[in-house]
Amino acid sequence: MKRLLLNTLLLPVAAFSTGLLLVSLLFPSVALAADAEFTLVIKDHKFQPTEITVPSGKKIRLRIENQDATPEEFESNVLNREKVIAGNGKATLYIGPLEPGRYKFFGEFNKDTAYGEIVVQ
Amino acid sequence: MFATAIIVFREVLEAAIIIGILAAATRNIPGSKRWLAAGLLAGLIGSGVVAGFTDVIGEFASGMGQELFNAIVLSLAVMMLAWHNIWMSSHGAALAANAKSLGRNISDGTSECSALLVIVGLAVLREGSETVLFLYGIAASDNGNQSSMLLGGMTGLLAGVVVGYTVFAGLLRIPMRWFFSITGLLVLLLAAGMASQTAHYLIQADLLPSLATPLWDTSALLPESGLPGMLLHSLVGYDSRPAGMQLVFYLTALIAIVTGMRWAGAQRQSAKATKQPG
């Protein structure tokens, strides 16, 4: 009996969160058109370009293309972002809206060579 | 080699802490260790599979597959941890008594143990797949110092396991009177921290508004790259630059689980009252 009650308590929570994810899966493109998009390329464990300038106060769609055969993790402490990009893979992530300033990022898997900055103006 | 050790340590730490806390919290449930070990094994196998399909997962949902995958894994773990804690509030007394008479069977023990398997499996899966990718990257690169880097990876792995074991051994030293309150609180904070991370991934995928970025910035005071920040991140979900939405998720999970625990505790009390009138 007690278990049944517990299960009925958890079920709506599970259903709700699954529903939330499904809805967001179906309508991911609604907001895309308005966002500014920028692209970074990873080659020979380096980011190209090493510096990109983006507008302040706007949500930024950042595309990262990994042209190396090995995976890389885009990471930025300042931006509070991390994302693994498969070897020869592509990834997209959102940052901002940001205040003007310089925001460092790096490739966690190849810290010595892979780094750069996002300049927000 | 040192850098490699740190990266692997960071990935292993969170899973190790979760396993350490759960192993301690369920020490009186018969067979719990076996279920934990099975969860670990399933998680390790899953890590390899997920790492192998990184590009497939990543391309899914217009490039947001990784965030969605992480968000789903984390929210499942939150639900399982919630279930575990609510279960403990109705069986805690029986388990404390069980400490004296070992081997007595607890009703419902199997469903509780399968929740353990899922939690451990998911924790290992999420952190493990990144470690596998990282180590694969080292093995596949041709910069000549693979062996030293792999040694670093092993060092990081070992250090993570040591921390997890320390958490486990430390918790076992707590007197029985306080034991379940403390492990319950730790599991509660673990779950809330994971709920906050779920929000973090959904914001990164632009599926949730951030509300405020960041809500506060304590990165100069207590950076997440340092050991204290790292430990706090794994234990209570500390974030040096959280978005407002993360705090909303954190508090919602906290309140929901505490309410569930109170409710389950009250059920036990009333069940006891009807069983023993007067």
Image (cartoon, coloured by chain):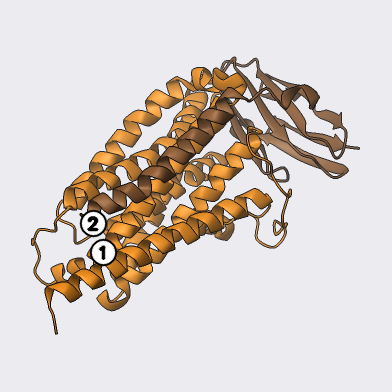
Chain colours: A brown, B orange
- In this rendering, which labeled residue sits more in front, label 1 or label 2? 2
Q: Residue furthest bottom?
A: B278
Residue B49 image-quadrant placement: top left
Q: Amino acid at mark 2?
A: Lys
Q: Which residue is mark 1?
A: B90
Taking the image as drawn, is residue B113 in sight?
yes
Q: Is residue B141 left or right of residue B147?
A: right
Q: Is residue A19 above or below residue B109?
A: above
Residue B15, horizontal then vertical, whole percent: 41, 46
Residues at discs 1 and 2 both on one chain: no
Q: Which residue is mark 2?
A: A2
Residue A114 at x, y percent in the picture: 69, 30
Q: Secondary structure at mark 2?
A: helix
Residue pictured at 49% horizontal, 34% vertical? A19
Left or right of residue B112, residue A46 in this image: right
Q: Nearer the viewer, residue B144 or B98?
A: B98
Three-letter amino acid code of the residue under disc 1: Ser
The local secondary structure at tag 1 comes to helix
- Residue B158 in view here: no
